[in-house]
Every structure is written in structure tokens, then in C-alpha cells.
Image (tube, rainbow, N blue to C red):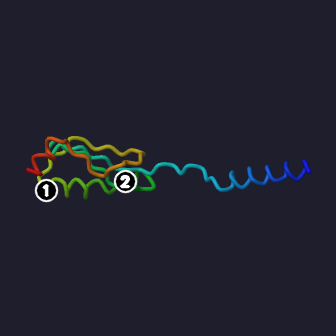
């Protein structure tokens, strides 16, 4: 009886371990912070930093055509919770 009990525990542990997959690595994102409007934009995800880098000119062109002034550009591994984050003062100005 003890053998059956231990076998059931063994099977349960194996099924839990088999069902959990290792955390997938974070993807690459382009982060562009603009001076005006004061926003942070995330573009991605990309599989490699080179792929992310090759797409930067198009993102910058789009933002500049909308009148944005660029502050900084970074390529980083992350998982942003929001793709566009703007300063609350700027957001309130739009809503008014």
C-alpha cells in the first residue's frame, strides 16, 4: 500500500514538472523617449537586437512626422506593460 501511495506522489510530481515550462526569455524592444510630447514609446517585440535596430529609422520617421522631438532611443530586453506611456500633464492637456 505504501508503494502505491509513493508511486502516486511520484506521478503527481512528474506531471506538475512536465506541465511547467521554463520562463521564455524576454524579447527585444525599441524604447523611444520623446521630449515633446513627453512620452515613452515601445516598439516590438523582436527576436534579436539587430532586428530591433534595423526598424528604428521607420519609428523615428513616424514620430517626427507627427511633430515629436526625440530625446533618446534604447534597445533593451523587457516586457512593457504599456506600449505608450505619456506624462500625465500632457495627457490632461489632450483631454481638455
Task: Residue at 13% x, 56% y: name it.
Answer: 66
* Distance from Cα at disc 1 to Cα at disc 2: 21 Å
The mark lying in front, picked from 1 and 2, is: 1
Which residue occupies the extreme left position in the image? 96
Task: Residue at 25% x, 45% y: name it.
Answer: 40
Which residue occupies the extreme front position in the image? 1
Crowd band around label 1 with a 10 angstrom C-alpha radius: few (<14), some (14–19), many (20+): few
Tell me residue 73's x, y (percent).
Answer: 28, 44
Q: Nearest the camera: 62 or 78? A: 78
Tell me residue 48's x, y (percent).
Answer: 44, 53
Mark 2 or mark 1, which is nearer the start of the sequence?
A: 2
Q: Nearest the camera: 51 or 93? A: 93
Residue 27 numbered tag:
none
* Disc 2 secondary structure class: helix
Residue 66 numbered tag:
1
Crowd band around label 2 with a 10 angstrom C-alpha radius: few (<14), some (14–19), many (20+): many
Q: Nearest the camera: 3 or 18? A: 3
Q: Nearest the camera: 72 or 40? A: 40
Task: Residue at 32% x, 50% y: name it.
Answer: 82
Q: Is residue 60 above or below residue 71?
A: below
Task: Residue at 15% x, 53% y: name it.
Answer: 64
Q: Is residue 90 above or below residue 58?
A: above
Tell me residue 29's x, y (percent).
Answer: 37, 50
**Quarter of the view holding residue 45:** bottom left
Horizontal relation, residue 58 to residue 17: left or right: left
Say if mark 1 contacts mark 2, CB within 8 Å.
Answer: no
**Quarter of the view holding residue 55:** bottom left
Residue 52 numbered tag:
2
* Disc 1 secondary structure class: loop
Image label count: 2
Tell me residue 51's x, y (percent).
Answer: 39, 56
Amino acid at each position: 500500500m505504501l508503494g502505491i501511495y509513493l508511486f502516486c506522489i511520484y506521478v503527481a510530481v512528474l506531471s506538475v514538472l512536465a506541465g511547467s515550462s521554463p520562463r521564455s526569455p524576454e524579447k527585444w524592444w525599441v524604447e523611444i523617449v520623446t521630449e515633446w510630447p513627453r512620452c515613452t514609446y515601445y516598439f516590438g517585440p523582436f527576436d534579436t537586437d539587430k532586428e530591433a535596430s534595423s526598424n528604428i529609422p521607420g519609428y523615428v520617421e513616424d514620430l517626427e512626422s507627427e511633430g515629436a522631438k526625440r530625446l533618446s532611443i534604447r534597445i533593451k530586453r523587457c516586457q512593457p506593460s504599456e506600449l505608450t506611456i505619456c506624462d500625465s500633464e500632457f495627457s490632461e492637456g489632450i483631454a481638455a
